[in-house]
Image (cartoon, rainbow, N blue to C red):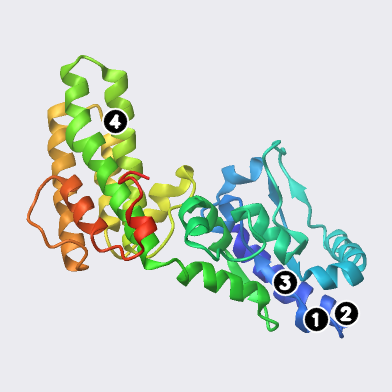
Amino acid sequence: MQGIEESEKFFVEHGRKYFEEKFPHLFMRLAFGLAGHGSECFGFDDDVSRDHDFSSGFAVWITDEDDEKYGFLLERAYNNLISEHLFCCSGKSSMLGETETGICKISSFYRRHIGLPRAPETWQEWMHIPEYAFAEALNGKVFHDIFGKFSAIRKEISTGMPEDVRLKKIAARLAVIAQSGQYNFQRCHLHNEPGAAAFALTEFVQNSISLIFLLNGKFAPYYKWMFRAMKTLSCGGELAAPLEFLLTDNAPYQEKQAMIEDICSQLILILSKQGLSEIRATYLEEHAFDIMKKIRNPHIRALHIME
């Protein structure tokens, strides 16, 4: 059983009744679930995952107001519940690791992941918050949230990105894909710069994955989970295998260049099906500039193509 399943099972069997009985006046204002950092929050954990920064249990998300009045009592109650049922942290802790279980203010959860205590409100915030941060704020599962404040912010992040921002990000990814994969990868080899060619290939793959997530209306996670998560996408998920091949196989660069062009052709088909670019061109930079023309916000449209 994976971590998020264990977490929900523990909440259903022990946590719900425990908190409802101890805090009957507060229970309806509490949100319970598991989300954020960690493979268990993405549903990608296995036995290896538990060797560090793994904590059994679940999260209890509360408002700032309730934290002032009941935070200490809730913390003590949660620790007693964990101790009673022998749930504990396991493995080593890293300096950058953080547990996502226990009592946590809603504002603190979102500030930790996206740098804001709420959903983004301006196009600048949407533009500059990393996609992996959004992915961490949206992963996992909410087990119980009748009050709805925690879930409302999740929904706003999931559906609230302005279309002009999404188009700008798509255009930027296309420009980098063209520069790194269609242009620089082969040239670096011809210059006898294998290290630079490897960098170019990495840029091509990472930006291709980010693009495919954006074309699905989703956010690419931390690089460690990009391929795993990409395989679940309905649009373009089948490109995970050839993209991984580019990074892991020792095939001649000519073969990889041909594969890059094939991937780009498939990306162009997706752009066409979604009505994002109607031009006939094989070089993705041209599609990037075509998409820039569709951006209505003049401030976003004036940004550099790769920003």
Q: Quadrant of residue 53?
A: top right
Q: Which mark is residue 23?
A: 2
Q: In the image shown, does 221 or 110 lie closer to the viewer? A: 110
State yes or no: discs 4 and 1 in contact (Cβ < 8 Å).
no
Residue at the spot of label 3: 11
SS label for mark 4: helix
Query: Which tag is nearer the camera, tag 4 or tag 2?
Result: 4
Q: Position of residue 224 (x, y in %)?
A: 47, 43
- The amino acid beneath tag 3 is Phe
Quarter containing the C terminus: top left
Task: Give the mark nearest the N terminus, 4 or 2.
Answer: 2
Residue at the spot of label 1: 27
Q: Position of residue 205 (x, y in %)?
A: 31, 41
Task: Give the mark nearest the N terminus, 2 or 3.
Answer: 3
Q: Is residue 277 left or right of residue 100?
A: left
Mark-to-mark CA distance, 4 and 3: 46 Å
Residue at the spot of label 4: 200
Task: Give the mark nearest the N terminus, 4 or 3.
Answer: 3
Task: Give the mark nearest the N terminus, 1 or 3.
Answer: 3
- The amino acid beneath tag 2 is Phe
- The amino acid beneath tag 4 is Ala
Mark-to-mark CA distance, 1 and 2: 6 Å
Mark-to-mark CA distance, 2 and 3: 15 Å
The crowding category of the residue bearing disc 4, from other C-alpha atoms within 10 Å (few below 14, some 14 to 19, many at least 20), is: many
Mark-to-mark CA distance, 4 and 1: 52 Å
SS label for mark 3: helix
User: At 26% across and 48% down in the image, what residue appears?
Assistant: 174
State yes or no: discs 1 and 2 in contact (Cβ < 8 Å).
yes
User: At 77% across and 71% down in the image, what residue appears?
Assistant: 63
- The amino acid beneath tag 1 is Phe
User: Is residue 169 positioned above or below 91 on the image?
Assistant: below
